Image: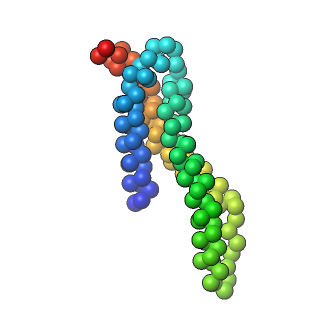
Amino acid sequence: MAIFIACLSLYGLASFTAAKRNKEIGIRKVLGASVSGVTTLLSRDFIKPVLVALIIASPIAWLVMNKWLEDFAYRIQIQWWLFVLAGLITIGIALITVSWQAIRAAVANPVKSLRDE
């Protein structure tokens, strides 16, 4: 449920950002930007905070999990690849959520966005 709510908020933020940068995207498209270039431009703005959150949260989660697991008679060692896998899944979910809105903004007709000027 929490992941779904986070995806909805990320989708709303991506929608707001695409609407706010509508004229910029239109100008880039008129000047010859590709759909993949515009999508990368919009997606990059959302991946940076996700990476910062992963860098901050991973060591804290590792410390808390090790402290919690010390109290069990049969305990396991937490492997590093679990944090990498969780990070990749998180980045994948963020990219899927944001890319839908970014692609929609990238394939829009630039004339409609620039008509107001």
- When the figure is inspected, residue 86 is found, relative to residue 115, above or below; the finding is below
Residue 89, visible in the rendered structure = no
Which corner quadrant holds the C terminus? top left
Residue 3, visible in the rendered structure = yes
Q: How many marks?
A: 0
Which corner quadrant holds the N terminus? bottom left
**Residue 113 place in picture, x, y as percent:** 34, 20
The single residue placed furthest to the left in the displayed view is 116
Quarter of the view holding residue 115: top left
**Residue in the image at 38% along x and 48% along y:** 8
**Residue in the image at 37% along x and 30% along y:** 20
Q: How is the image coloured?
A: rainbow
Left/right of residue 87 with respect to residue 7 in the rendered view: right
**Residue in the image at 36% along x and 42% along y:** 12
Of 21 and 101, the residue lying toward us? 21
**Residue 56 place in picture, x, y as percent:** 58, 56
**Residue 84 place in picture, x, y as percent:** 65, 55
- When the figure is inspected, residue 76 is found, relative to residue 51, above or below; the finding is below
